Amino acid sequence: MLERRRGERRPLPKKLAFVLGIRPDVIRAAFVLRHLRSYPEIDVTFIWSGQHYSDNLKDVFFRELQVTPAEVDLGCRGETDAEIAAAVISRLHDALQEISPEAVVFLGDTNTTTGCIAAAQLNIPIVHIEGGMRSYDWRMPEEKYRTIIDHLADVIYVYFDEYRDQAIREGINPDNVVVVGNPIVDVLDLHYFSGQRRFAALSTAEFFSSRGLQRRGYLLMTCHRRENVHEEKSLQAILDLAAASPLPVYFPASYRTQKVLRELGVQWPASLRIVDPVGYDECLSLMVNSRGVLTDSGTVVEEACILGIPSVQLRRSTERPQVYDVGSSVKFDPSAPQRYRPSTVYRKLAGLFGKKWDHPFGDGKASQRIAEDLRRRLATDGLQRHRKQDYRIPVERSYREDGLADPLGPMEGAP
């Protein structure tokens, strides 16, 4: 090994900005961030958009997953998607100008990812983790956001070959797309399966009795998507499904969902217990000790599949059809409840309890693959992928000369 000569300066670390804004993205990014922060040649600045801001939607996830809190909090809040997105773009633009990173990493498909527009305006390479997903349901804000960021991104990390194919069909350069597997597997392997003794100690009789529950005697529910919560017909269909449950339904509801329920004056069944959002450890404990999960969350339906818990996916369409491939999930379309009789849904769900399936989400090394690939690209200046030579289609016409002769003749010395 070569020894460092006296007076020789160590190269300055390459700067990398990592932008997140909601709790599911913290979960999925936790070990990617941990790997990146372990590399001395990379200076990571963690930026929090502020989309989620209360302790039980943000800080508790940092604590439980041992994520170093963000160095920058943009405080982007608003009553509408437009207000939040506008604040993210504007404030992130200023932050990136000050930090001047080599690249900006985003994960997911929420309002926070619209910050990729600020990075593009500054010609900073964009990295998108969780690319290529498509529900082909244009009602969903997330569908619009993931389409935008995938087409602006220089490097896209996708979970499946299927997602890579979807991106390529849209004209995205296949050289920009890297299949890595799903980091949610890494998180559950290292946080839950390696800590089952700790979770067993948490899941006491008092844990359940204090929540009015009996172990294996309830269903866990989450519901937050715009097309479900802000469409009164769909929201009522979900509540009607919960009312028909043969078991009590425990529903940690987002504050936005609770607000909509109050504003609409919606009555929910006595069997549905609505509580404030819970931390990650509590959510996992509730999930693994339930008889099943009712959810419109992409992350929760993946976690349930990996943990061997059956689920009902409360979605008309999904970017995660793999749970149907392995038979871990039952479909319920809130926009067409007449097609899904509750008694049939619950019989299907009950039939899945105790069954085994092999989850399709990867080998638990996705976080490491992402971090190592980013490390290599930073070291070799391999992140910029929107240069003329990077396009896989003919671009010469866009760069052609005008072909016109100078009326005064060629300039002296001109070729």
Image (tube, rainbow, N blue to C red):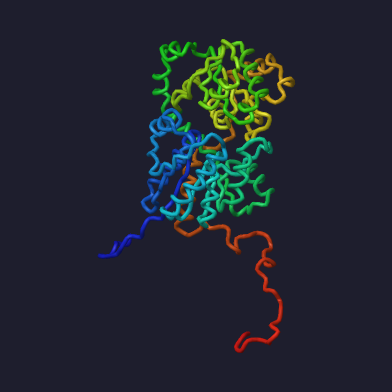
Q: Residue 20: image x %, image y %?
A: 48, 41
Report the side of 316 relative to 180 (left or right): right
Q: Residue 215: image x %, image y %?
A: 49, 13
Q: Nearer the viewer, residue 82 or 273?
A: 82
Does residue 131 sit above or below 238 in this rendering?
A: below
Q: Residue 67: image x %, image y %?
A: 40, 37
Q: Residue at x 62, y 28 (%)?
A: 230
Q: Quadrant of the C terminus?
A: bottom right
Does residue 368 sit above or below 388 in this rendering?
A: above
Q: Residue at x 58, y 58 (%)?
A: 386
Does residue 138 sit above or below 98 in this rendering?
A: above
Quadrant housing residue 132: top right
Q: Nearer the viewer, residue 187 or 96?
A: 96
Q: Residue at x 74, y 21 (%)?
A: 339
Q: Nearer the viewer, residue 301 or 387?
A: 387
Q: Residue 72: image x %, image y %?
A: 40, 44
Does residue 408 sit above or below 391 in this rendering?
A: below
Q: Quadrant of the N terminus?
A: bottom left
Report the side of 327 relative to 370 (left or right): right
Residue at the bottom extreme? Answer: 412
Q: How many marks?
A: 0
Quadrant housing residue 321: top right
Q: Nearer the viewer, residue 394 or 152?
A: 152
Residue at the left extreme? Answer: 6
Residue at the right extreme? Answer: 339
